[in-house]
Amino acid sequence: MKNTQDTELLFDLSRPGRRAARLPACDVPERPLSELLPSTALAQTPPNLPELSEPQVVRHFVNLSTQNMSVDTHFYPLGSCTMKYNPKRNERAASLPGLADLHPYQPDSTLQGILQILYELQEMLQEISGLAACSLQPAAGAHGELAALLVASAYFRDLGQKRSIVLVPDNAHGTNPASATMAGFQTVSIKTTSAGFVDMAELTAHLSEQVAVLMITNPSTLGLFEPNMRQIADQVHAVGGLVYLDGANMNAILGITRPGDFGADMQHYNPHKTFSGPHGGGGPGAGPICVTERLAPYLPVPLVVRQNEQDLQKNGDSPPVYRLDFSRPKSIGQVRAFFGNVGVLLRAYAYLRTHGPEGLRRVAENAVLNANYLLSRVKTMLPVPQGDRCMHEFVASAAQLKAEKNISAMDIAKRLLDYGFHAPTVYFPLTVAEAIMIEPTESEGKQTLDAFAEVLSHILQEDPQLLHDAPHTTSISRPDEVRAARHPILSHPEE
Ligand SMILES: *Cc1c(COP(=O)(O)O)cnc(C)c1O
């Protein structure tokens, strides 16, 4: 009989009176809560909490955690997500008490260390982007997109220009059109060619003085560097529009080329992807944005600024050198409490400092090398429609297999779990039928890449029925993903 006790619902394990800790008898006079708290702060009935011993609680959560896959336990070739290994030194640095125990309401004069780190992080991100100014505030890549589009909106309002359109190539991440809509723009989709690039005739046809921003992911979600990038940017600029770079794929170009140099006016970073912050399970992330000089006044407040020498001398003895600048009249305001998801930013800082400029360039080179190595092995088994060469990721297609043997991308993804590999991203981008998007990242060695290729080859020879029913080794097999997301059962059914 399978022992399921340790993953049973805590509510089912609960027994009246069970406790994790017992307090000594009270040796001061007891007073009822109603004397100590206003009635509005008191519930009618106590909350329905499970009553458990400490080992029950610990086993429950530890056992649940081992049913998941993670970068620390498994290879995670999840395209578009850059699930690279998160070095433990970043964790140590970010949890130093001098950083982790600070409170954002402390006066700037007592926050000089962390403000210096954040200031230097702004500077490093600007340098990597080739853009002039940076805000660390947004809480995720998608939030960075929204904040930057609001910056663009404020900029055009200031110029007295009415521009309502945001152009987005059809292989973009779903957050791009969503952010554009939330920022009040109308999204217009631009077709890409069969080679996976922006269709220049389509672009020209859609350019007008109504266009505020072109959002482009370069390298794209197909793992391709846009060959007409400079020309695209020039054409958008020629009608007075701005170019937004979705920086989720910065891993492929760190230290090799800079968005500001190939025509971007704004970009976001996903430090939880590119700079090895932990991610998954919905966060936490961060989404710093960098912009050109002329867009800088509109960035969200606060920015971390360094006082110049003159101000320092005027202020007399040892004033704070770094401070939070809230007095930026053209700013779109705050988009996040305090100065952003600092824990994630500190990990990014530790990562950037560890690598330095040369190391960052090698990160990109090895990410591209690993992806091309795996591409060369995978394309002998599955067609890779745009697969001569790739950047940091590539997209294979199971469409032929589906037609011939009724094996889908989902079947392959699910069966990989049985062999201890996290599934690649599937069914994205939408422009490739039965897409399987693979991104190995630079943090894997050849042994792992070979093992993955061999398992994939083995799976493709297996009985299709075995694949349809996969995974066989996980605690649940194929949940209804939509229902699980839309109607999660989070409490005991009796409640
Ligand atoms: C991950 C990703 C995003 C969104 O970033 P989040 O940090 O998840 O909000 C946007 N665009 C692309 C191409 C991505 O891969």
Image (cartoon, grey):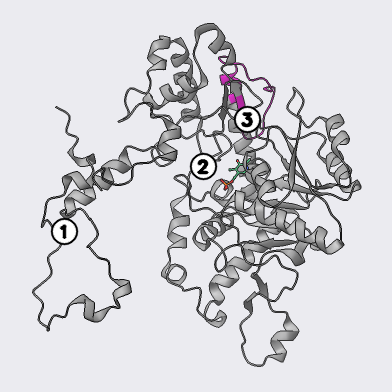
Which residue is tagged 3? 429
Is label 2 in contact with label 1 (beta carbons under 8 Å)? no
Is 250 rendered above or below residue 144? above
Give the left or right position of residue 429, taking residue 282 as reference. right
Q: The magenta stretch spans which residues?
A: 375-395
Q: Residue at 37%, 18% (x, y): give it.
A: 469
Could you tell me the amino acid type at mark 3?
A: Pro
Q: CA distance from mark 2 to mark 1?
A: 38 Å
Secondary structure under the numbered disc 2 in the rendered image: loop
Looking at the rendered image, the quarter that the N terminus falls into is: top left
Residue 384: within the magenta?
yes
Mark 2 or mark 3, earlier in chain: 2
Could you tell me the amino acid type at mark 1?
A: Ala
Give the left or right position of residue 139, taking residue 454 as reference. right
Q: Residue at 69%, 22% (x, y): give it.
A: 388
Which residue is tagged 2? 84
Q: CA distance from mark 2 to mark 3?
A: 20 Å
**Residue 190: horizontal and vertical position, in percent?**
77, 33
Which residue is tagged 1? 20
Residue 119, by quadrant, is bottom right
Mark 2 or mark 1, earlier in chain: 1
- Quarter for ligand 1? top right
Could you tell me the amino acid type at mark 2?
A: Lys
Queried on whether the Cβ of the residue with tag 1 lies below 8 angstroms from ligand 1, the answer reads: no
